[in-house]
Amino acid sequence: MARKVNKKFLALFLGVVGAIGVAGAILFFAVQKSPEDHIAIGEAALAEGRYEDAFTAYGKAANKRKGDPDLVIKLGDILDTISSQDVENYRRARDYWRMALQVDPKNQEALERLFKRAQDEVNLGGRPDAAAFQNLRESATALLAVQPDHRAARRAIPISHIQGWLSDVVTESGQIDQAITQLEQLYEEDPADDLSLYFIARAKMRRAELAIRGGNSTGGQALLAEVEKLFDDAIAANPDDAGLHFRGAQTVTMLAAYAREADQRQEMFKRALARAEEARRLVQPDDQLFVDIHTTVSALRRQQGDMQGAEAVRCV
């Protein structure tokens, strides 16, 4: 015989189950965080130095907001911050910046980061090879396609040719001529552009050295005199520019190696120190050359036998 169904109980049971189902659905949607929620969590983790948690949070935001290059760039930035802890993060950071360009090929933030990375690999990586210089030129060219007036990128291309040549990368003489001309144009646009002037000087010093080695001592010495005059004229026109005084000090220090007499060489070191000291007097603490200038003053004071003065500057 069929059992009777307690309709009141069944209604109550179904009601409870239904209520649980609705509550569960509400709870499910309540715990589903938006991209903004994950970004907020990531920012809080960054503020506390919890980089792995920040990376996870931004990764979730990027997965929910696909096609947002800014979030992909942020992932690369986080990896770059902790690249000193794991060299693999250094490579992965660049990969994420490149991924951002797959979403937005003209994204200036990603292009800026890749350009800066290429610069670092040339300037901070020991003795770079031809591929590193080529990568820098390609990164600069890509950035210039989006921002044609980007001065650092404009300057990086000719400088990379000169740097490569100085590092014994095979470079045609005509390419160096063109690089010097491009840097001269940049210097004409901005007479405070100490870096362009410095690499013009470096290129001419190298040519002077090659001329002297090739038996053309007169031509080589004439080029060396021309190099020193570059900074004499630049400093006379811009006497309050710390960068020009600093690059002038670097240049005279290198020129001292070509001095024929010890007394002449010592006199040049004194002139280099005077320029470096003036750069130190003029430079501001927030200038990117601040540390380099103080390091140069310390080294030149030590060269002059002023050990106490060298240490005092080194400790600043």
Image (spheres, rainbow, N blue to C red):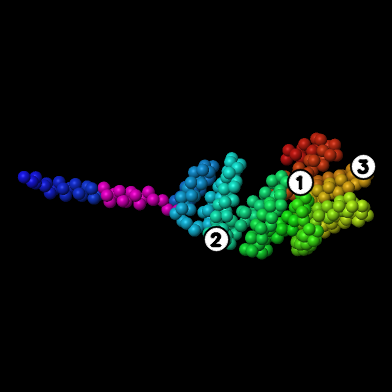
Residue 314 in the figure: left or right of residue 101: right
What's the distance in space between the residues labelled 3 and 2, CA to CA?
59 Å
Label 3 neighbourhood size at 10 Å, few (<14), some (14-19), many (20+)? few
What is the secondary structure assignment of the residue under circle 3? helix
Which of pointers 3 and 2 lies earlier in the amino acid sequence? 2
Q: Which residues are magenta?
A: 20-35
In the drawing, what numbered circle is on residue 262?
A: 3
Which quadrant does the C terminus fall into?
top right
Q: Position of residue 229 (x, y in %)?
A: 87, 56
Which residue is at a point 90% across and 44% down the rendered structure image? 265
In the drawing, what numbered circle is on residue 293?
A: 1
Which residue is at a point 82% across and 42% down the rendered structure image? 300
Dominant secondary structure of the residues highlighted in magenta in the image: helix
Closest to the observer: 211 or 221?
A: 211
What is the secondary structure assignment of the residue under circle 2? loop
Q: Position of residue 226 (x, y in %)?
A: 87, 56
Which of pointers 2 and 1 lies earlier in the amino acid sequence? 2
Residue 142 in sight: yes
What's the distance in space between the residues labelled 2 and 1, CA to CA?
40 Å
Which of pointers 1 and 3 lies earlier in the amino acid sequence? 3
- Type of amino acid at the residue the image marks with label 1: Ile
- Type of amino acid at the residue the image marks with label 3: Ala
For mark 2, what is the residue? 104
In the drawing, what numbered circle is on residue 7?
A: none
